[in-house]
Amino acid sequence: MPDQIDQIKILYWDKNGFALWHKRLEKHRFHWPTTTDGVVSLGTKQLEWLLAGLDFTRAHAQLSYRFAS
């Protein structure tokens, strides 16, 4: 599966049945995470970032501090 695709389909459960959402971009690409089987499970924030055009797989490292002044 390529890491940049121009269309995305989302199948989700909507209270009493499945719903299919489809979006196709004319000029830009979605930054799709690399997987072996093409199936990706995303959280709410990750989905928002993906649809906004952000590459959530390359987030910066989390910082931690021992002291604050």
Image (tube, rainbow, N blue to C red):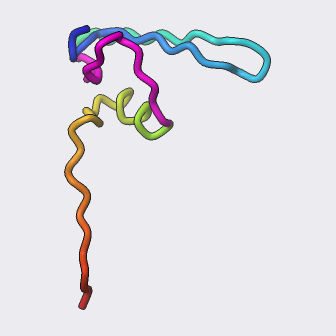
Residue 46 x, y percent position in the rendering:
40, 36
Q: Is residue 51 magenta?
A: no
* Main secondary structure found in the magenta portion: loop
Picture quadrant where residue 39 is located:
top left
Quadrant where the N terminus lies? top left
Q: Using residue 8 as the reference point, say whether residue 6 is left or right of it.
A: left
Q: Residue furthest right?
A: 16
Q: Using residue 10 as the reference point, say whether residue 27 is left or right of it.
A: left
Residue 58 x, y percent position in the rendering:
21, 38
**Residue range of the region highlighted in magenta in the rendering:** 28-43
Residue drawn 24% across and 75% down?
65
Q: Residue furthest bottom?
A: 69
Q: Using residue 15 as the reference point, say whether residue 52 is left or right of it.
A: left
Residue drawn 26% across and 86% down?
68
The residue lying toward the viewer, choosing from 56 and 41, is: 41
Picture quadrant where residue 45 is located:
top left
Q: Is residue 33 magenta?
A: yes
Picture quadrant where residue 42 is located:
top left
Residue 28 x, y percent position in the rendering:
23, 17
Residue drawn 68% across and 12% down?
18
Quadrant where the C terminus lies? bottom left
Please state the total of marks drawn on the protein image: 0
Residue drawn 20% across and 50% down?
60
